[in-house]
Each structure stands twice: as structure tokens, then as C-alpha cells.
Image (cartoon, helix red, strand yellow):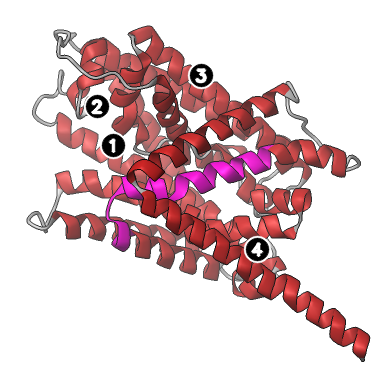
Amino acid sequence: MQVAPKKELSLFDSTCIIVGIIIGAGIYQMAPDIARGAGSWPGVLLLWIAGGLLSLCGALCYAELATAYPREGGDYVYLSRAYGKWAGYLFGWAQLTIVRPGDIAVMAFAFATYARTIFDPLAGHPAISQRLFAAIATIILTTINILGVKEGKWTQNLLTVVKGLGLLAIVGVAVFARKVTTSTADFDPMPLSLALVFVLFTYGGWNEMAYVAAEVKNSRHNIVRALVLGIGAVILLYLLVNGAFLYTLGYTGLATSEAVANDAISTVFPKIGGRLISALVCISALGAVNGLVFTGARISYAMGAEHKTFKIFGKWHERTGTPVWALIVQGIIAVTLIMVFGSFIDTILYTAVAVYTFYLGTALAVIVLRFKEPNVERPYRVTGYPLTTLIFCAVCGFLIYSCVTYAWAFKRASIIVLAGILTAGLFLYWITEVHNSASSRSNSESS
């Protein structure tokens, strides 16, 4: 008998998955660059609000699709139904080889960067140390998720609660801190468009709920609630933290800081502030890695359940209640990318174009499926449709253009590799699905 996913995720579990994946290390690493693009302290807060609201537009699109088609796989299911099996296949292939292992590697690198400031037995070999810490984190969290859904979700809940409390602690420290002298250092402003790209990157991950839709209790209502609550909580936390940075450092101090959270908390804890922040960033990054591992394997599971080429992924382990082989292969590829790339910037460029291209395709699928499958029950319909959907599609188009332009100018190899892997995916689909189906029909007719 085929073992299927069980509904084990509550509203709290689902919200923790979203918040835990969104809040990685981006808020600490990109806040100064975003401030340089905002132009003023009110602009900083407005830019973070805009990023949150634009992400909410995308989340509402996913909410309609996830409640109408509450199955494992998320975009894989929606793209297949909207455009044909080739689109879902290409998405699953890209997730398996490019996007999900790359996302895991990005957050694992962020963990490694800060973990090394606390303890580094290989201090004289930073490149090896960076890869080692990142790989160990990926292997341990993959193993936890293989052991069972409960182990994976409890790990996620704990890391998310701790990181949320840590962010609130930064805000609390700022309230009682003495305001430091505002910096007068000069800095080069950043284009507003690039700052918006960074903001939206820090909000990335809200779509992960779609990948575990089949495991959510009362999915008709809790999927939408988790998406809205999750993004709302992240917007609030981001605004509070940036407000704390602005209060303690001033606008120029924020824009010129090289370690903004460390600088802010050091106003109260000058001796141990750096270690406290490093520990908090490590926890934030680990929460993102665990969430990405948990949800990513569900995409490969959905693909394996429908395509013989990847059937090994389409098996749900009876004892652990997890897609064991999907988790193992995903972990192996992620560790391989960690060893090959060695830094999170190169890994981001490796994944970004594919990510936003599929975001665009899924958002448009809301419109396509309303015409193609009008009789499917939709417990939730996108608020503000079609304007909400079109706004998000425009944002995706803008991000694709920005990423391609930058990558082609500075990291051309990443675009070439990406195009080659996607082309290989289409060729594999043609060989295994189209060609084999045509041969089977021909043999059947001849007999």
C-alpha cells in the first residue's frame, strides 16, 4: 500500500515554517545596503514596508492555488495543471538541481560565516573552515528531517521562536541604549531598484507553505492564515529591528556599518555584543536551512510520484513518515554546491533567475487556471484580483531583468551554467516522457 503524507502541521507549525525560512541572515547582511538605496531614514522604513506588501501580493496568489490544490509539491502541481506536464517537470528538475540545494547552501554559508567567529578550529584555513561548517549544518539538519516529521517541525519551531526572541532582544537593547553619535562618514548611494531587489530577497521564502499543503491541518483556512500571519510577523519584526538600528546608529551610521547588528548591540554590551549577535545569526540561518530542507524534499516527492525517471523520490517512508530518498539526494547536492562555490554570493546568482522565473509562471497560473479549470473549488480567492496578481508579476519581471543584467556583467558563468541545466532538463523530459510515450503508442498500434 502506498504511504501518503499525514496532516501533522498545525497553524503554529505552518507559521513557524514561513517565519523561520524568511528570517535568515539577510536582515543582518543587507540592511546597510538597503539603507544606502533608501536615501533617508523614513525611506528605509517605507522600503521595508513596500517589500513586505509586495511579498504579500505573491503570497495571496499562492494561497488561492494551495487551497484549491492542497497537494505536496506546490509550484510543481500548479505549473503542471496550468501549462502542461513539461512545466511542472522543468520546475521539479530546477528545484532538484539548482534552486533548493542552492538556497540551502546560501543559508548554510551564512551560518558558517558567523559560527567561525565564535569557534574556528581551522582559523588558518578560512576557505576550508567555511565549507566544513556549512556542510556539517546541512548534514545534521537533513538527518533530523529524515528521522521524522515531528522531529523536523519541532526543530523548526524551536529555532523560529529563539530567532524571533533574539530580534526582539535587539529592539529591547536599543530602547535602553544610549544613542551613539551620528556618523558623518560619506558613502556611495545605491540605486533604489537594487535596494528593492535586496529587500525582496530578505522576504523570500513565504511560498514554502505551498510545498507542504497536504500536511496542513484544516488546510482550507490555515494555509491562508499562516501566510498572512507569517508575513505580517516578519514585516513587524523587520520594521522594529531597522527602527532599532536607526535609533542607535542614525541613518548614516546604518548606511555605513559593516556589521550593523553588532554595532547596535555593542552600544550596551561592548565586550560580548559581537558573540551574542553571531550566535543569533547562526540560529536564524539554521532555522532557514531546516525549513528549506523540510519543504524542498516535498517537491521532489511530488515529481517522483508522477514521473518514472524520479520514482525513487516519490516514496513516503512508512516508519518515519518522510520522503527519505528525496531528503538524502537533496542533501548530497546541497553539500556538493557548498564544496564547489564556497560563498553565498555566487550561490545566490546561481539560483536567483530560476527562482523569479518560476514565481512569475506560478503567479500567472492563478489567471490561467481560473479560465482553464473554472469549476475547481477555490476556498480562497486572491484579494484584489487581478491587480494583486499583476503587481506581483511585474515585480518578478523586474527582478529577472535585474538579476540577468547583473549576472551577465559580473558572473556570466552562472547564467551559462543555469541555461545549460534547464536545457538538460527539457531534453530529459523529451527523452523520458514525450519520446517514450510516442514509442509506446507506436508499438501498441503496430501490435
Q: Which residue is mark 4?
A: 303
Q: Which residue is mark 1?
A: 280
User: What residue appears at the point 61 percent right and 38 percent down from the top-left corner?
Assistant: 11
User: What residue appears at the point 56 percent right and 22 percent down from the top-left corner?
Assistant: 53
Mark 4–mark 2 Cα distance, whole angstroms, equals 41 Å
Q: Earlier in the sequence, mark 2 or mark 1?
A: 2
Residue 371, position in %: x, y? 86, 39
Label 3 or label 2, whichever lies nearer to me, is: 3
| Element assignment for label 1 | helix
Q: Is residue 115 above or below residue 221?
A: below
Instruction: Name the mark on residue 261.
Output: 2
Q: Between 158 and 250, which is closer to the camera in this rendering?
A: 250
* Amino acid type of the residue tagged 1 in the rendering: Leu
Relative side of 67 to 335, left or right: right
Label 1 or label 4, whichever lies nearer to me, is: 4
| Element assignment for label 3 | helix
- Where is the C terminus found, in terms of image quarters? bottom right
Q: Main secondary structure of the magenta part?
A: helix
Q: Is residue 135 above or below residue 201?
A: below
Magenta residue check for 348: yes
Residue 331, position in %: x, y? 43, 64
Q: Is residue 33 above or below residue 400?
A: above
Instruction: Name the mark on residue 50.
Output: 3
Q: Is residue 255 above or below residue 369?
A: above
Q: Earlier in the sequence, mark 4 or mark 2?
A: 2
Q: Are marks 2 and 1 in contact (CB under 8 Å)?
A: yes
Label 4 or label 2, whichever lies nearer to me, is: 4
